[in-house]
Image (tube, helix red, strand yellow):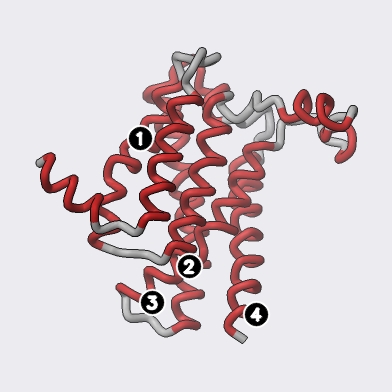
Amino acid sequence: MISGAAAYWKVLPDPQRRMILSLAVAIGLANIAQPYPDLAPLQHGPTVALLLATPWLLRRWPLSNGATGCIWLFLLLHTLGARWIYSYVPYDDWARALVGYDLSSVFGTSRNGYDRLVHFAFGALLTAPLAQSAHRFGGLRHGWSLAFAFTAIGLGSALYEIFELLLTLIAAGETADYYNGQQGDVWDAQKDMAVAQQGSALALIALLRRRA
């Protein structure tokens, strides 16, 4: 098993191996003095499982460095948010330390918006890898692969919201509201899906302009 894993690792391009290693380091750093240890396994567990499977996945379904980089950046954003279970990412504190004022005041928001950013990134960053996969491994033409990616983002967003609901009810217990990041907004799931679709639409425009 170890030799097989090493074989998968060796055939990966150097940039992709560096991405995998840097993501592993990021996950490790995100769990030092973890402020929410009870919820950390729910937040980081799926990322760790995906990280371990990545060499095999990329060997079986190879992607370009650019497409892999999009996935890597999305997972880094998720890992950062997961440290503070999304609802408590202290970006306002960081902004005040850097420029003297917080982002919430600038944009007139009262909720922590980091989860919205990551849902937007889900659409914006994963559209290209999905389209490339549909073209390479599904045999779809360029236009149809883009349509598939846009639709898959919508489906993935909806399935994730359902999965998140079931997971919080089963595993998170009394901490369910902290885990799912609803922050008192009854329309949180719908807004998350909407911003993901907006991110995907912008990615499609960029991909079409690039091809043109």
Query: Which amino acid lies under the numbered mark 3 shown in the image of this protein?
Result: His
Mark 2 or mark 1, earlier in chain: 1
Against 202, is 24 above or below? above
Query: Which of the numbered marks, if any, corresponds to residue 48?
Result: 1
Residue named by callout 2:
149
Query: Which amino acid lies under the numbered mark 2 shown in the image of this protein?
Result: Ala
Whole-number angstrom distance, CA of label 4 to CA of label 3: 18 Å
* Element at label 1: helix
Residue named by callout 3:
135
Mark 1 or mark 3, earlier in chain: 1
* Element at label 2: helix
Indicate left or right for 8 with 133 as reference. left
Residue named by callout 4:
209
**Which residue is depicted at the point 38% across and 81% down?**
140
- List x then y, in percent, for residue 114: 66, 37
Q: How crowded is mark 4: few (under 14 residues within 10 Å), some or many (20 or more)?
A: few
Mark 4 or mark 1, earlier in chain: 1
* Location of the N terminus (image quadrant): top left
Whole-number angstrom distance, CA of label 1 to CA of label 3: 28 Å
* Element at label 3: helix
Query: Which amino acid lies under the numbered mark 4 shown in the image of this protein?
Result: Arg
- List x then y, in percent, for residue 76: 52, 41
Mark 2 in CB contact with mark 1 (< 8 angstroms): no
Q: Residues within 10 Å of mark 3 (few under 14, many from 20)?
A: some
* Element at label 4: helix
Indicate left or right for 196 with 143 as reference. right
